Image (tube, rainbow, N blue to C red):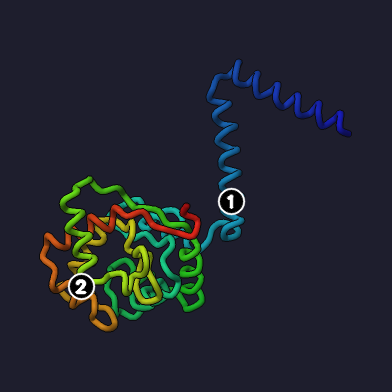
Amino acid sequence: MKRAVKIGAAVAGTTLVVAGTVLGPEIVSGYRFMGALDAYYADYETNVGAWPQLQDSCFQCHGVNGQSGNAQYASLAGLPATYIENQLQAFAEGRRHDPQMGPLAASLDDGRIAQLADYFSRQSPARNEAAAKDSALEQRGQATVAANACTSCHGDHLMGGPIAPRLAGQGELYLVDQLKAFKSGQRQDANRAMNGIAGTLSDTDIAATARYLAGLTPVTNDTP
């Protein structure tokens, strides 16, 4: 039996070499691609189960595994589950307004909302789209964050908590939009704390805060 396995392996290896020699590197690349695809689906099933899953409908805006690479959209990876649930309920009930998220959230029952919140909260976060370096603007943003005690709600390292989202590494444009929405009253939080804070910020303060926060690397339990 062992001899048969060895012979089979030798034949397979020879076939791959011959394919690469006779038919060109495209065949070898194809084999490698299929191997990588198999590995991806194995990891996927270990993480969430059989494909497709409910959260796959979110990737177009929020990225694979909830990690957006577009500065206009929020990254969901690593957000506290309670916060995600609260926001989806707010979209569903019309307390938070968005032409895309409103109808989508309204179509979900409580079980599916909890499922999405649990999934995204378990994903490892990373920085969103990189922002251009501007030391002076970033220093102003850091000072603004400190002056307004943002960590008191958003947690150590600005990684979020039950009532507030992770800010570290979120998209710069998304952060600007949300701060402006709080300032104008278009978006409101339960105790209006964010409305009050954002109302004191100038446009330059908002730009500086967003630039500073977008440049932070999310800290997780796996971070050395």
Residue 67 in the image: state x and y as whole percent: 40, 55
| Residue found 72% across the figure and 27% down from its top | 12
Q: Secondary structure at mark 1?
A: helix
Q: Quadrant of residue 179?
A: bottom left
What type is the residue that disc 1 sits on?
Answer: Asp
**Residue on which the image places disc 1:** 43
Position of 21 with respect to 1 (left or right) is: left
Position of 104 with respect to 184 (left or right) is: right
| Residue found 19% across the figure and 47% down from its top | 134
Give whichever of discs 1 and 2 has the lower sequence position. 1
Q: Secondary structure at mark 2?
A: helix
**Residue on which the image places disc 2:** 182
The extreme bottom residue here reads 191
Residue 108 in the image: state x and y as whole percent: 44, 74
Q: Quadrant of residue 214?
A: bottom left
Q: CB of mark 1 within 8 Å of CB of mark 2?
A: no
Residue 13 in the image: state x and y as whole percent: 70, 25
Position of 34 with respect to 158 (left or right) is: right
The extreme right residue here reads 1
Position of 213 with respect to 84 (left or right) is: left
Q: Is residue 20 above or below residue 163?
A: above
| Residue found 81% across the figure and 26% down from its top | 7
Q: Quadrant of residue 148?
A: bottom left
| Label 2 neighbour load within 10 Å: few <14, some 14-19, many 20+ | many
Q: Nearer the viewer, residue 151 or 79?
A: 151
Residue 70: image tag: none
